[in-house]
């Protein structure tokens, strides 16, 4: 699914969280969205997913303007996302969590897909435990799997690796790399190694402004990027 | 456990010392239906309504207003009218109220319910004002009235309405159990746990919340109709916030997220209200104390005591 965000502006009171930011992601592309804390990355995801109405600008999916569509309609158009802070169903079991995801907002069947999803996420052993009782790594794995279980064509990942151990990181990376090209991927991630391992193009935000957009090599060489972001880390 | 409870209730007319206890059981069963309907909202949907009496009262008033026309249709016509009244009232109220969450939802439902109460109280020509409406028939089907006690001799003392109340409660329990276990019920729990995530997964959460509100109101209307038939009247106290508060206490004391908990809470509250109050005026104090104790020390409600006992064995 092709994603075009055109000149998106979002204000929170006096703060310009996004100032005319554009993002054009081709179908099947792997794109990273990076930038320091407070740059506006999550805000941009919220606009694309439908949680936030931008003050100006528009969002297009496969050329269709969805700016005024609610989140659930965009989700049914195959937009999936993960959240920076895990957004699980705490008191429901892991398999009940996934059951809600595989139904994708409909009330029909498809429950048979749950065991496969549990296995793919490495969560079969904890399937009957409430999500709140999982360790951080398992919660992050479930967080990603909830989005994947909807079989998205556009997947927005907000810091999926945050707080993971080395081994968990490798497992998550492998899971993302194995995704088919029918999935367009936009990933926000502070782990630069992960970014360079996945991304074909990188967009850099700072203080709500897009300061760079290009291949990893171009972005790495960009002096403004080095100054505000790479240089600091 | 539901089987044990059902066995006790079915056999009640045989061993009960007096008709008084049958009337206590009938009122507990009616409150149980009302409490289960609220539990769908509060326990499963995470929507704390403080105005659920509006729909209970509407169910009673529908019977009071329409009994000349409904009598021909018999018991089912009255019960259906009660449910329909609940639905009709819940559509506009719910359309606005479910936009709010948490304490705002609670205040909105309270405000709407008090508006309904005010209307019933003041529109005397239509509602009977303070007096309400009386003379509503019990509408017990003829075959039950005539043949019931041959099949079940204990009904001679208990009265046939006990069968009506028990049947309504059992069917409401079965219906609400099916709803909570259906994909719809699961989605409702998902919305309670994390509404934002549900939207991101493609669920139109507003519609789900509204549907839950309307279904809960239908069952509250059913309970209201049953109480109107049993007592023979509809009056403003059935719409008043005291009634909303009492059913809320029943659900929380019994245990939210469990229909059986709501039933348990309803029996507890009814017994305190009817039985204890004949010994002491301070029954509300007792109820309040139990409520506070449960909230502080037993968040799962009385039903969770049963679960603990089950495990220990
Ligand atoms: N709901 C909100 N109300 C007010 N300000 C907000 C809101 N959400 C975000 N902000 C502000 O907007 C700016 C951008 O926030 P955003 O969460 O998009 O940053 P980010 O790039 O995702 O940062 P991080 O790397 O820390 O997650 C920040 O200054 C933040 O404080
Ligand atoms: Mg963020």
Image (cartoon, coloured by chain):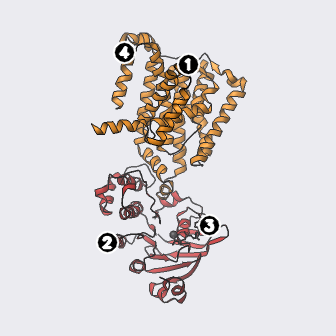
x then y, percent, for residue B15:
36, 15
Q: Are marks 3 and 1 on the same chain?
A: no
- Quarter of the figure with residue A191: bottom left
- Of the four image quadrants, the one with ligand 1 is bottom right
Give the mark count: 4
Q: Which mark is residue A167?
A: 2
x then y, percent, for residue B74:
52, 19
What residue is drawn where x is 29% and y is 39%?
A: B312
Q: Residues within 10 Å of mark 2 (few under 14, many from 20)?
A: few
Residue on which the image places disc 3 = A54
Residue on which the image places disc 4 = B15
Q: Is mark 3 within 8 Å of ligand 1?
A: no
Q: Are marks 2 and 1 on the same chain?
A: no
What hue does chain A carry in this figure?
A: red
Residue on which the image places disc 1 = B231
Give the CA separation, mark 3 to mark 2: 38 Å
Along the viewing direction, whichever of A174 and B300 lies nearer the viewer: B300
Give the CA separation, mark 3 to mark 1: 57 Å
Letter of the chain that mark 3 sits on in the rendering: A
x then y, percent, for residue B124:
72, 24
Instruction: Let me know if residue B94 appears in the view.
Output: yes
Along the viewing direction, whichever of B76 and B188 lies nearer the viewer: B188
What residue is drawn where x is 36% and y is 19%?
A: B11
Residue A205 is left or right of residue A114, and the answer is: right
Residue B306 is left or right of residue A37, and the answer is: left
x then y, percent, for residue A116:
30, 59
Which chain is displayed in orange in the rendered image? B
């Amino acid at each position: 699914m092709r994603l075009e965000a055109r000149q998106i502006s979002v204000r929170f009171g006096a703060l310009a969280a996004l100032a005319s930011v554009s993002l054009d992601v081709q179908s099947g592309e792997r794109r990273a969205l990076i930038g320091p804390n407070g740059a506006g990355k999550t805000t941009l995801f919220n606009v694309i997913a439908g949680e936030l109405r931008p003050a100006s600008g528009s969002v297009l999916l496969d050329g269709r303007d969805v700016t005024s569509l609610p989140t659930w309609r965009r989700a049914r158009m195959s937009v999936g996302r993960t959240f920076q802070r895990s957004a699980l169903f705490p008191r429901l079991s892991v398999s009940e969590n996934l059951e809600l995801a595989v139904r994708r907002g409909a009330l029909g069947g498809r429950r048979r897909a749950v065991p496969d999803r549990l296995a793919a996420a490495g969560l079969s052993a904890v399937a009957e435990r409430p999500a709140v009782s999982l360790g951080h790594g398992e919660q992050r794995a479930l967080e990603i799997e909830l989005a994947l279980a909807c079989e998205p064509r556009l997947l927005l990942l907000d810091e999926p690796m945050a707080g993971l151990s080395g081994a968990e990181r490798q497992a998550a990376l492998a899971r993302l790399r194995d995704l088919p090209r029918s999935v367009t991927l936009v990933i926000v991630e502070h782990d630069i190694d992960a970014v360079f391992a996945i991304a074909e193009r990188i967009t850099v935000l700072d203080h709500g402004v897009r300061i760079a957009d290009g291949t990893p090599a171009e972005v790495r060489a960009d002096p403004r990027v080095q100054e505000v972001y790479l240089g600091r880390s | 456990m539901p089987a044990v409870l059902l066995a006790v209730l079915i056999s009640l007319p045989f061993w009960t010392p007096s008709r008084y206890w049958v009337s206590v059981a009938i009122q507990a069963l009616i409150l149980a239906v009302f409490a289960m309907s609220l539990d769908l909202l509060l326990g499963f949907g995470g929507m704390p309504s403080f105005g659920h009496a509006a729909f209970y009262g509407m169910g009673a008033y529908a019977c009071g207003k329409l009994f000349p026309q409904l009598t021909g249709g018999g018991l089912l016509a009255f019960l259906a009218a009660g449910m329909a009244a609940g639905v009709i009232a819940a559509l506009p109220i719910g359309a606005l109220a479910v936009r709010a969450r948490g304490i705002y939802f609670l205040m909105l439902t309270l405000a709407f319910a008090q508006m309904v109460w005010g209307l019933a109280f003041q529109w005397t020509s239509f509602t009977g004002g303070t007096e309400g409406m009386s003379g509503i028939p019990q509408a017990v089907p003829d075959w039950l009235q005539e043949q019931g006690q041959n099949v079940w001799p204990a009904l001679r003392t208990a009265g046939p309405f006990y069968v009506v109340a028990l049947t309504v409660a059992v069917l409401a329990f079965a219906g609400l159990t099916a709803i909570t276990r259906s994909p719809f019920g699961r989605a409702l729990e998902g919305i309670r746990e994390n509404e934002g995530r549900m939207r991101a997964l493609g669920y139109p959460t507003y519609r789900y919340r509204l549907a839950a509100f309307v279904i809960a109101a239908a069952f509250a209307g059913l309970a209201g109709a049953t109480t109107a038939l049993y007592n023979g009247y509809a009056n403003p106290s059935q719409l008043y916030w005291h009634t909303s508060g009492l059913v809320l206490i029943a659900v929380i004391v019994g245990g939210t997220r469990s229909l059986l908990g709501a039933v348990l809470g309803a029996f507890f509250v009814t017994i305190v209200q009817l039985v204890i109050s004949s010994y002491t005026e301070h029954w509300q104090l007792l109820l309040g104390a139990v409520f506070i104790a449960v909230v502080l020390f037993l968040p799962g409600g009385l039903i969770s005591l049963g679960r603990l006992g089950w495990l220990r064995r």
